[in-house]
Image: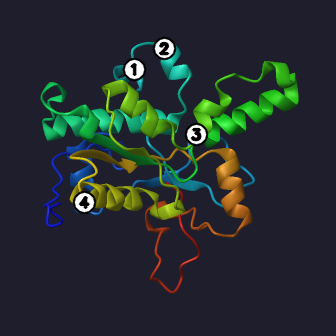
Amino acid sequence: MNYDRRVVITGMGTITPLGNELETFWSNLKNGVSGIRKIEAFDTSGYDCQIAGEVRDFDPKPFFRNAKDIRRTDRFAQLALAAAKRALEDGGIDLEKIRRDRFGVIVSSGIGGLKTLEDQYTVLLTKGPARTSPFTIPMLISNMASGLISMEYGLRGPNLCIVTACATSNNAIGESWRMIKFGDADIFLAGGSEASVVAIGLAGFSAMRALSTHNDEPGRASRPFDRDRDGFVMS
């Protein structure tokens, strides 16, 4: 076995607060544009922290076959499927010319379908257990994004979801590198996806006193090496 096997990145796909296309994301990143703003997804009145990095103007329809599939997929997995499609296109991957049993997926999530959990718990409390969606568990588990990508493209290589909090995506990329280098697969779709900027997520991190409360200057709120730092910003 060749342990000196070279591993390279051939394509990228991004759906982020800095832009939903790779070119926009990269340009904003290089120019120091911040994706942190006032939260728009829900009413933050009463929250100490009212800012976050939200993905805006994302339309899942181009990435799904029908509206039913969209409804049955949590937002974190929707974002992952969209980014995966963009990465395959950017890398020029021809799925008809590769061994799909040697093509793996490690697309991870630190917290999975938090919005689904929030919504379905509300249904449980207000309407009773019989009204809870049968898709609750498949929608909220963290490994669903990785699984959906594999099923969408018929990829039969190693399929994993690494959950290591804020290090999750980097961990996924590193593990993919290791598995290619040591011959477990030839290609990997690697990365991560989160959609945790929801009421329960913001409340939970706020209760830990982990979040910045520089609500008046969102673009400068995340400043880990500043003496006036007061927490991180969800994104």
Residue placed furthest toward the front: 1
Mark 1 or 3, which is nearer the eye?
Answer: 1
Give how far across and how far down residue 207 sits, in percent. 74, 63
Mark 4 or 1, which is nearer the eye?
Answer: 4
Q: Are marks 2 and 1 in contact (CB under 8 Å)?
A: yes
Residue in front for this viewpoint, 71 or 36:
71
Label 3 to label 2, Cα distance in Å?
21 Å
Instruction: Bin the neighbour count of mark 4 within 10 Å (Cα to Cα): few under 14, some 14-19, many 20 and up.
Output: some
**Residue 233 to residue 11: above or below:** below
Residue hosting label 1: 64
Residue drawn at the location 55% of the way across and 63% of the way down: 216
Counting residues from the N terminus, which is met first, the one under dot 4 or under dot 1? Answer: 1
Label 4 to label 2, Cα distance in Å?
41 Å
Residue hosting label 3: 41
Residue in front for this viewpoint, 37 or 10:
10
Which secondary structure lies at badge 1? loop
Numbered mark located on residue 152 in the image: none
Counting residues from the N terminus, which is met first, the one under dot 3 or under dot 2? Answer: 3
**Residue 212 to residue 72: above or below:** below
Three-letter amino acid code at the position of disc 3? Ala
Counting residues from the N terminus, which is met first, the one under dot 1 or under dot 3? Answer: 3
Q: Are marks 3 and 2 in contact (CB under 8 Å)?
A: no
Q: Quadrant of residue 189?
A: top left
**Residue 121 to residue 37: above or below:** above
Give how far across and how far down residue 114 sits, in percent. 63, 43
Counting residues from the N terminus, which is met first, the one under dot 4 or under dot 3? Answer: 3
Q: Are marks 4 and 1 in contact (CB under 8 Å)?
A: no
Q: Is 208 left or right of 177, judged from the image as shown?
A: right
Counting residues from the N terminus, which is met first, the one under dot 4 or under dot 2? Answer: 2
Residue hosting label 2: 67
Mark 3 or 2, which is nearer the eye?
Answer: 2
Q: Is 126 left or right of 70, judged from the image as shown?
A: right
